[in-house]
Structures are given as structure tokens and as C-alpha cells.
Image (cartoon, rainbow, N blue to C red):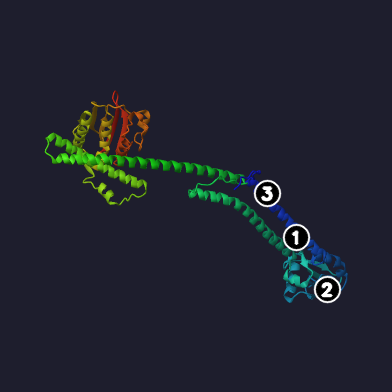
Amino acid sequence: MERIKRKKKRLYAMFISFLFRFGILAIGLAGLTAVIYMVTVHAGVVRLPSYELDKITRAEGEIRSGGQVEEKLLPDTCRYGVFEKDGTYVYGNLSKEEQEGLWKSQMQSSPALIYGSYWKVIEKENGLTALVEYQVIAKFSNPFLRSVFPNAELLFVGAYFLMFFGTAVALAKRQGKYLQKRLNVLKETAERVEREDLDFEREYSDIQEVDHVLGALYQMKEALQKSLKEQWDIKRQKEDQIASLAHDIKTPLTIIRGNTELLLEEETEEEKREWDQEILDNVREIERYLQILQRTIRQFDGELNRGSKDGQEEKKEEEKNFPASSWIQEICERAQALGRMKKLQICCKAADTDKMVYGRKEECSRALWNIVSNGVDFSPLGGELLIEIKESGEFLAVTVTDDGPGFTKEGLAHATEQFYQADKSRTRKDHYGMGLYIASEIMKEYKGFLQLENAEGRGGKVSLYFRCV
């Protein structure tokens, strides 16, 4: 739609204009009806409401002094009856049923509205009383028309309302089509935004309020388009990072595992065999992580089957809760093995506890191992890694303190976010911003929590609070 440059209309002004035209229409139709009415009166087709009373009044003198002259002097639409003083009906054009009832009503009150009509009482000079009926309504002169439409006024009023209703409907439909045409643009724009069909230009309207809504929808479209693009970019970056990580790890894993298996087949000193076994254990652990990464990639593509065999295998655990004491010992032993590569002094301070940790052992180990592994990676060669385990109320607190550079202020706030790498002080080319995120998510799942801080005079300090039962 081309941009509408002329002055825009306001809705309230349009409605005022519509009401004005509606009023003009009503007045115009009323005037037309009055003109037609007066023309028919002038032509003698319709008699004025005062016609009967005027004619009776003009003939009253002759009726009073004359004899049986009523039929000749009165209008043909009037009924009348002449009575003696005792109520005896003498003559007239009343039915038998009306004769007695009319006289009684006349004797009980002054002339009034009887049988839906007014009655004129005329005392004749010969001692008789004439009662003449008249109505103050417009009537047709033609007897046939009068029999079909006894009240001509109602016919004209009815005709007026019919014309008014018909023209009002036509005017309303015309106005409705005008608004519908402009609102259709609004509807189509809203539907396109709803369908996320965002490849369209700004629409305009000559109605100011509609144009404002179109502008708001266009801004919404722009914001949605930007948001979808950002989401797509983030998704693509995550997929690229995960796919790259899985691909890069697979190659060295194949080499390490093949060489280690060859070494195990040969007879070597006990210590070397022990180290080789540790390598194999860690290779299996990394392979398990690769399976998780592969499932994550499928999840991004919408292909993750929650009821799949892989998902079922991952959920299999021997216990929901497990003893803390033996588990702590395993973690400390693995930390010692990992620290040997950087000649780190692993200091593990564990208080005796008989607590049972709430959660699956495999998942809790994964959370803690991510933190210990991070501590080792960020500690300098020959440094120290401190692991402290103690009870803290209903939690088992495991704190890992390294000798690294610690967290920046921004890192303390965002380091647990997935793929967060903005904390340059603790960012390495072989880290992908997943360790703290994974640990944090596991802790939330099992009703615990993770806490980040910097140790005074040392590096980063990460505490995991595992809920105990």
C-alpha cells in the first residue's frame, strides 16, 4: 500500500460525521413525509384530524333548530344517535347494542371518550338530544382506503420509519464497508506477524488510530524479526561449538585408548599399570560426555527422543541416594591423579560424615568433577588445589579453591551461564563455558546450589551444596 500523505481522519470525527449525516437523514425523511402528507390533504385524499369536529361545529346550529337533518349535515365518518329525555332511542345510525350503553354513559358523566371516540352532545329545540361521535385523527376520504387504513396518520408514520430504517441500514453498510476495508489491512498485518511471515513493508492508513496500530505492529514485527534472528544465531553458535568439541575430542580419544590398551597387554611395573588404568577410566568418562553432547546436538535439531534407549540408559542408577563418605574418597583419589599432570599439590580436607547425599551418584559426581577439573586447569604448574568437605546444616558443602587468577566481577554474575566465556581471566582455548553451567543445573535438579567467590590471597573458590537426607 502506498503511503497515504493526505491529512488523516480521526475515529471520533468519523463517528460525529456519521451521526450528523444520520440526523440529516432523519430530518430529511421527516420533511419528505410531511410534504407528502400535506399534498394528500390538499388533494382531498386525506382529511385532517380536525375535519370531523369542524364540520360538526359548523352544523351544530342547524342540527339544534332543525328536524331530522343529521345524516345530511354530518360527515359520513360520524356515527350519531338522537334520544328522548327518558333515553328512548329515536333515530340515528347506531347499532342496538350501542344505543342503551351510549345513553347510560352520557347520563352518568359529561361528554367523554366512549368506545375510543369523542361524543358531542347537542340539545335540540324539539326536546330531543343528539349524541354525535367524532375522532381527532386523519382519515382517508376513500371508503375502501379508510377500511384498510382506519388511521391515515399511522400509515404515514409507518412509512416514515420504513424509509428511515432502509436508508439507515444502507448508510450503516456503506460506513461499515469503508471501515472494514481499512481494518482488513490491520487484520492482515496482525495475521502475518502471528504466522511469523515477517517479510513485508510498513502499511499505512488514512485513519489516524488505525495507522498508529499499524505502526506498532510494524515495530513489533521488527523486534520479533530481530529476536528470531538472534535466537537462530545463538542456536547455530551452540551447535557449532558442541559439534566442534565432540569432533575434536574424538580424535585424541581414539589414539589414547588404542595406545593404552596396547600398554595394558604388556607386562609393566605396577605403578605404570595403575596410571594406564586411570587413563582408561577417564577415557570412558569422556566418551560418556560425548554421548551427552551428541544428544544435545540432536535436541537442538528437534530430534531428541526422550523415550530413546540412550535416555533410558542414562537414567539407570542403582540408588537415588548414596553415602557421602565413600564418594568423597573417590573424588579425592581422582583429583590426585589429575593433579599429577601439573605437579599440583592436592589438599583434601574431609570431615567424617555418615550423611546420605540426595541424588544420583553419577550426576553428582559429574557436577563435582567439573569443578575439580576447572580448579586443576586454572591452577599454575606446581600450585595447590584445596578441596574441603564438611557438613553445613542439611547440606554437604564441598568447596574447591584454586591458585588461579580468580573470577572477575562480571564472571561472578554470569559464569554459570551456558557457553559463557566473557570472563577473560578464566577463559582458555580448551574451555567452552560448560563446566560451571552443567554443575549448576545438576545442583538445581537435586535441590542444592552452587556458590562462586574469590578466596582471599588465592584464586577462584567454588562451593557445591549437596542436599542430604
User: Which quadrant of the figure contains the C terminus?
Assistant: top left
Label 3 sits on what residue type?
Answer: Ser
The crowding category of the residue bearing disc 1, from other C-alpha atoms within 10 Å (few below 14, some 14 to 19, many at least 20), is some
Label 1 sits on what residue type?
Answer: Thr
Q: Is residue 337 left or right of residue 110?
A: left
In space, the residues marked 3 and 1 are separated at their CA atoms by 24 Å
Q: Which of the two labelled residues, at mark 3 and mark 1, occupies the earlier sequence position?
A: 3
Rendered view: 363 above or below 118: above
Q: Secondary structure at mark 2?
A: helix
Disc number for residue 17: 3
Q: Which residue is found at the position 33% from the left and 40% from the top?
A: 244
Residue located beneath label 2 in the image: 71
The crowding category of the residue bearing disc 2, from other C-alpha atoms within 10 Å (few below 14, some 14 to 19, many at least 20), is some
- Residue 117: x, y in percent? 74, 66
Query: Could you say which is closer to the camera, residue 78 or residue 257?
Result: 257
Q: Which of the two labelled residues, at mark 2 and mark 1, occupies the earlier sequence position?
A: 1
Query: Could you say which is closer to the camera, residue 60 or residue 431?
Result: 431
Asked whether residue 354 is in view, the answer is no
